[in-house]
Amino acid sequence: MPDLYVVKKDGVAIDVQTSTAGVVGLNEFVDGKISGAGAGTVSSVNGHTGEVFLTASDVKALPDTTIIPTLPGNATAEKAGLMSKTDKAKLDALPVFTFEKVGEA
């Protein structure tokens, strides 16, 4: 059985508790979309057909030999990092959302 969770903002419940089991016909609908002959198959990818092996250039990605630069540290209220210390203060001021298990469907 799926677990039920309640979403809380600053400790106060703000959502309706439900699960996908509460949506009549959902499982059958999803099963019809992802099962059966040919499910998940495509006829071509970026102009390639048949058994396709993509390279980084096929999908405009960097080659696997690319050297990734060292990332800066995490930001704090006192110092900048991946974001400015001003943005970190704004992020820290956002309301806190938590998920609490309340039962099973």
Image: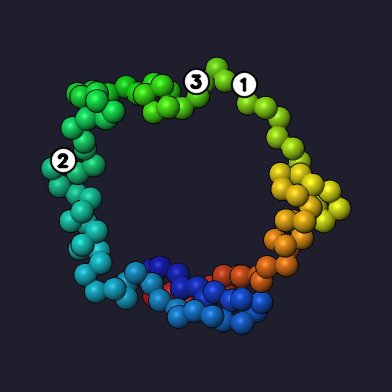
Q: Residue at x 57, y 70 (%)?
A: 99
**Front in this rendered view, residue 102 or 76:** 76
Identified by mark 2, the residue type is Gly
Residue located farthest toward the right when viewing the structure as drawn: 78
Q: Residue at x 68, y 68 (%)?
A: 94
Rendered-image quadrant of the N terminus: bottom left
Specify the label residue 63 is tagged with. Answer: 3
CA separation in Å, label 1 and label 2: 39 Å
Rendered-image quadrant of the C terminus: bottom left
Residue 61 drawn above or below residue 23: above
**Front in this rendered view, residue 41 or 94:** 94
Identified by mark 3, the residue type is Pro
Residue 9 drawn above or below residue 69: below
How far across and down, in percent of the image, does residue 89 sit?
A: 77, 60
Q: Quadrant of residue 27 in the image?
A: bottom left
Q: Quadrant of residue 21 in the image?
A: bottom left
How far across and down, in percent of the image, does residue 103 sit?
A: 48, 77
Q: Residue at x 82, y 56 (%)?
A: 77
Q: Which residue is mark 2?
A: 38
Q: Which residue is mark 1?
A: 67
Identified by mark 1, the residue type is Ile
How far across and down, in percent of the image, does residue 38 sit?
A: 16, 40
Q: Sequence order check: which comes first, mark 1 or mark 2?
A: 2
CA separation in Å, label 3 and label 2: 31 Å
Q: Residue at x 63, y 26 (%)?
A: 68
